Image (spheres, rainbow, N blue to C red):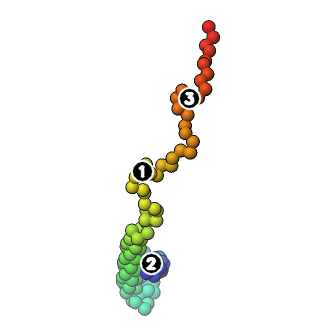
């Protein structure tokens, strides 16, 4: 499911880019009024602008919806397989988790004591 949404997302992005590049700017409309030749085109003088702008709006909506879908899928993926769900549970008694020492530690007064002489 996620792969299908990613493919649709990439295709929608490429279509939006292509459709935006195909559209004429605002200054191109003035050229059509003086007979630049676009009035006799397939869609008419303003038909291509409406068709391209509507198609761009539809593809932008598809891009927006696939973005929301991918966000939804990625946020719910973390609840299924989280970092904490793969670890072992902590022991109930924290003292039981501390290993016992293998040799007893020297206590105060048992080891050698060296007196420090201070010169006068």
- In the image shown, does 57 or 28 lie closer to the viewer? 57
Q: Position of residue 79 (x, y in %)?
A: 39, 68
Q: Position of residue 90 (x, y in %)?
A: 42, 57
Across and down, in percent, residue 83 comes to 45, 63
Crowding around mark 1 (Cα neighbors within 10 Å: few <14, some 14 to 19, many 20+) is few
Q: Which residue is mark 2?
A: 2
Q: Are marks 2 and 3 in contact (CB under 8 Å)?
A: no
Mark number displayed over residue 43: none
Residue position for label 1: 94
Q: Is residue 91 above or below residue 66?
A: above
Please tell me whether residue 86 is drawn above or below residue 55 in the rendered image: above
Q: Secondary structure at mark 3?
A: loop
Q: Quadrant of residue 30?
A: bottom left
- In the image, residue 26 above or below residue 45: above
Q: Residue, x 41% and y 68% (percent of image)?
A: 78
Which is closer to the viewer, label 2 or label 3? 3
Element marked by disc 2: helix
Q: Position of residue 28 (x, y in %)?
A: 43, 77
Q: Earlier in the sequence, mark 1 or mark 3?
A: 1
Specify whether residue 59 is in view: yes
Q: Residues within 10 Å of mark 2 (few under 14, many from 20)?
A: few
């Amino acid at each position: 499911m996620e792969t299908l949404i990613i493919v649709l997302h990439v295709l929608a992005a490429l279509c939006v880019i292509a459709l935006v590049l195909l559209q004429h700017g605002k200054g191109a409309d003035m050229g059509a009024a003086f007979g630049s030749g676009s009035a006799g085109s397939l869609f008419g003088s303003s038909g291509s602008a409406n068709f391209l702008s509507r198609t761009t709006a539809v593809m932008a909506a598809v891009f927006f919806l696939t973005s929301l879908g991918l966000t939804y899928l990625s946020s719910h993926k973390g609840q299924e397989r989280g970092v904490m769900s793969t670890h072992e549970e902590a022991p109930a008694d924290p003292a039981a988790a501390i290993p016992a020492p293998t040799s007893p530690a020297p206590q105060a007064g048992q080891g050698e004591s060296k007196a420090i002489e201070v010169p006068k």
